[in-house]
Image (tube, helix red, strand yellow):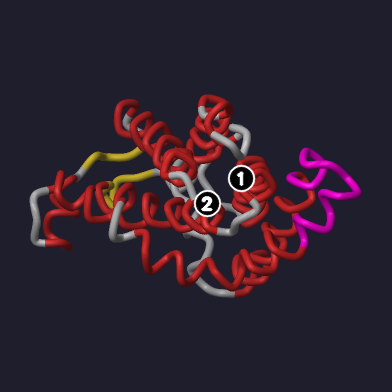
Amino acid sequence: MPWRTLAAAWAVPVLGTGLAYGTAWLTGAARFDPGNLAASTGLHPALGVVLGLVPGVAPFVVLALGEQLGWSSLLVTRLAARRGPAATAVILGLAWASFHYPLMLFVPGAVEKGVPVPYALLMFTLQTVTLAFPLVWLRLRTRSIWPVLVLHATMNASLYFVAEAMTSAHDRSAWMVGEGGALTTAGLAVAVLLTNRLWRRPRSC
């Protein structure tokens, strides 16, 4: 597996999360508080970011494995042969979101207080459909599950180990950031567009 392919998979969620939270911090939609990250890791915030975005990806790879064996190794490979990659990405994104709906609907705290559940479901669905495009192309072009696992795991690591950890929990807009946030949705969409040439590289690259 070429390192550039894995780097592209890693870059999509890192860029998307950075755009979303950077915008939130600059506009006041959320308060930048790197002290939270320093307190939780015992390290300088910069080192905490590196820790979260590199070794911090590993535990989420394990967690993503079960999901992606189903989505990428079964659904995507079979569906793409009949529908093509674009339609497959939309179907995958909708299925991926639907898989998480019971958690968001029935588990207390899964949707942040004050955020309407339909709104959170919509934002989360838009996010999964958006991420499904690089996931599908990476899986089909590389014939490997590794880039898919890296992208999925890095999305979780960048959100929970870094972005949320550097945001004041008492001074943030759950409508804007987090899994159900509009800025998170927009940031991921922009990142997918900006990295289009990276994740769509031919297999030989």
**How many neighbours does mark 1 have within 10 angstroms: few (below 14), some (14-19), or many (20 or more)?**
many
Q: Which residue is mark 1?
A: 138
**At x 52% / y 73%, what residue is drawn?**
108
Residue 4 located left or right of residue 51: right
Image quadrant holding the C terminus, namely top right
Report x, y in % for residue 114: 50, 54
Residue 88 in the magenta stretch? The answer is: yes
Residue 76 in the magenta stretch? The answer is: yes
The region drawn magenta spans: 75-89
Q: Give the answer, above or below, for where 109 lies relative to 196.
A: below
**At x 28% / y 47%, what residue is drawn?**
167
Report x, y in % for residue 52: 28, 55
Secondary element under disc 1, as helix, strand or loop, is helix
The Cα atoms of the two marked residues, 2 and 1, are separated by: 6 Å
Residue 119 visible in this rendered orientation of the protein? no
Query: Do the residues bearing badges 2 and 1 touch, measured as CB atoms within 8 Å?
Result: yes
Specify the label residue 148 is tagged with.
none
Q: Quadrant of residue 7?
A: top left
Which of 173 and 16 lies nearest the eye of the viewer? 16
Q: Please state which amino acid type lies under the numbered disc 1.
A: Leu
**At x 67% / y 53%, what residue is drawn?**
118
Q: Quadrant of residue 28?
A: top left
Report x, y in % for residue 148: 56, 54
Residue 128 located left or right of residue 44: right
Q: Which residue is mark 2?
A: 147
Which of 82 and 180 lies nearest the eye of the viewer? 82
Report x, y in % for residue 81: 86, 50
**At x 67% / y 65%, what residue is drawn?**
101
